[in-house]
Image (cartoon, rainbow, N blue to C red):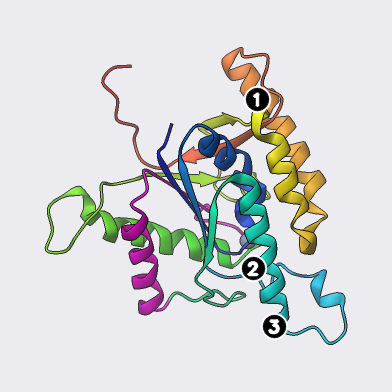
Amino acid sequence: VSQKMQVIGAHSADFVWRAGGTIAKAVNAGATAEVVALTYGERGESGELWKESDQTIDSVKRIRHAEAEAAARHLGASFHCLDLGDYPLQITADALASLTDTLRRFAPDVVITHTDTDPFNPDHPVCFTAVDRARGLAAGAGVASAFSTITPPQLFLFEPHQPELCNFTPTVHVDITPAFEQKRAAMAEMKAQSYLQTYYTQRAEQRANHARRASGLQDVRYAESFQRVLPEVVEEL
Ligand SMILES: [Zn+2]
């Protein structure tokens, strides 16, 4: 069980679909969880809000902030957004420094972010690269450095929308059955992307099937899958 979990997404709703149950389960077990969004997804992932006439960027950001905060509350996590601007997300030197500070300040045991490839979403791989660099900088590559560093956190990638096209191979299934009602409540807050609720409920059921086959644990009804990036260090196999 991770004590401090930091979930970093390109857009403010990404955490809900891909790691909502895992966040809730960790918090229910005593962990602290923080969700960091690099942007509100105000241009690229707020389509339904833009159907209203007279809609503005500021209004979309306000609505998306409220939705993400409410969703994070259902999971027991805090939410904050760096508001770097989406579609395209650009990582300036200042943005990288600010993301690195975010990691140093929270000092997570576990970091979760996007895959390095996504042909349908130009911002997600940019977020991966930024998080990977910031994690390396914050941890000082695991050795003594001239600047303050944190213990290297574990790095996991959450499941993208079309995993086969995104270099995603699940290496960890998390049983989220006991926390699924919390995930359902969090997903329901994302009114700008309500069409995804059915999709990610079905995905959780499919991954639970895979988790049952891999483990023999018959009680897994809902699961979320992740890909581990760094080797797991253990005392014995
Ligand atoms: Zn996104």
- Cα–Cα span, label 3 and label 1: 41 Å
- Cα–Cα span, label 1 and label 2: 34 Å
Report the disc number at residue 210: 1
Q: Which amino acid does label 3 sit on?
A: Ile
- Cα–Cα span, label 3 and label 2: 12 Å
Chain-order first, disc 3 or disc 1: 3
Q: Is mark 3 on a helix, strand or loop?
A: helix
Categorize mark 1 by other alpha carbons within 10 Å: few (<14), some (14-19), many (20+).
some
Q: Name the residue under label 3.
A: 57
Q: In which quarter of the image is residue 193?
A: bottom right
Horizontal placement of 141 versus 99: left or right? left
Report the disc number at residue 65: 2
For residue 150, above or below residue 220: below
Residue 149 visible at all: yes
Q: Percent x, y for residue 23? A: 55, 42
Q: Which amino acid does label 1 sit on?
A: His
Residue interval drawn in magenta: 92-120
For residue 25, above or below residue 209: below
Q: What element carries label 2?
A: helix
Q: What residue type is labelled 2?
A: His
Please name whichever residue, 21 or 141, is drawn nearer the observer in this view of the structure. 21
